[in-house]
Image (cartoon, grey):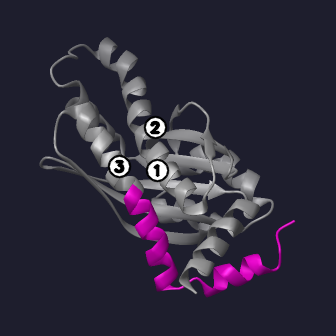
Amino acid sequence: MVSDDYEKYIRELDELSLSALKETFNIGASRAADSLSRMTGRPVSITVPEVMVVRIREVPEILGDDIKMGVYVRLSRGIEGHAFFLFEPEDGKRLFTIISGDMVETTREIDELYPSAMKEVGNILISSFANALSEFLGTVIEQTPPEFVMDFVSAILDFALADVGKYSDYTVILRTEIVIEDFEFRENFLLIPDPRSMERILKTLMEGLL
């Protein structure tokens, strides 16, 4: 059962609180950029310009309930919940082209290598954000191997939102901006913690601002 303070934390979450949370995730974004730069051999910049705490039922509308590709990881131990990195199909194809260079030529090779490449990218991003959050909370967050997903947003998130939605009305969305040389990608990282984990994040955040 979530404590009565949970809703209080949500209601009192102001711009200063969100800025502090955004700064935590920007630390993860910087680390992810370094890892992705080594992977692609190109300069990479990743920032988190916006962090939103939103009602679960509003997520498909906010993201646009169209077909997206993504990577899913289950979080446990220090934080229980779900993490998704979602991107537009066209952005995914362009990112894959950057990663693979001229090494991939046939449709068959693309079909075989694309999910693996996207899982690697998604895992880099999710792991970097999760590690930054684990340091912020002073805990260890364990992750399952990444899974590649492609469907309408509502279908991709259905099981995770249903799992958490039994106990909580809220989740966290991070708008991410990835720039690789002259190419800019605007994607979304979703952290969908269970209520106790969400409460822990918010409580630590609020205490840090006192």
- The stretch of residues the image draws in magenta is 1-27
Q: In the displayed structure, does residue 130 sit left or right of residue 94?
A: right
Label 2: which secondary element: helix
Three-letter amino acid code at disc 3? Arg
Q: Is residue 210 above or below residue 161?
A: below
Three-letter amino acid code at disc 1? Asp
Q: Is residue 49 above or below residue 13?
A: above
Find disc 3 in the rendering and name its residue: 31
Find disc 1 in the rendering and name its residue: 66
Quadrant of the image occupied by residue 196: bottom right
Q: Is residue 175 visible?
A: no
Quadrant of the image occupied by residue 72: top right
Residue occupying image coordinates x 38% and y 61%: 26
| Pointers 2 and 1 in contact (C-beta within 8 Å) | no
Location of the N terminus by quadrant is: bottom right
Residue pushed farthest front?
138
Q: Position of residue 48 (x, y in %)?
A: 36, 63
Q: Is residue 13 magenta?
A: yes
Q: Is residue 70 magenta?
A: no
Find disc 2 in the rendering and name its residue: 123
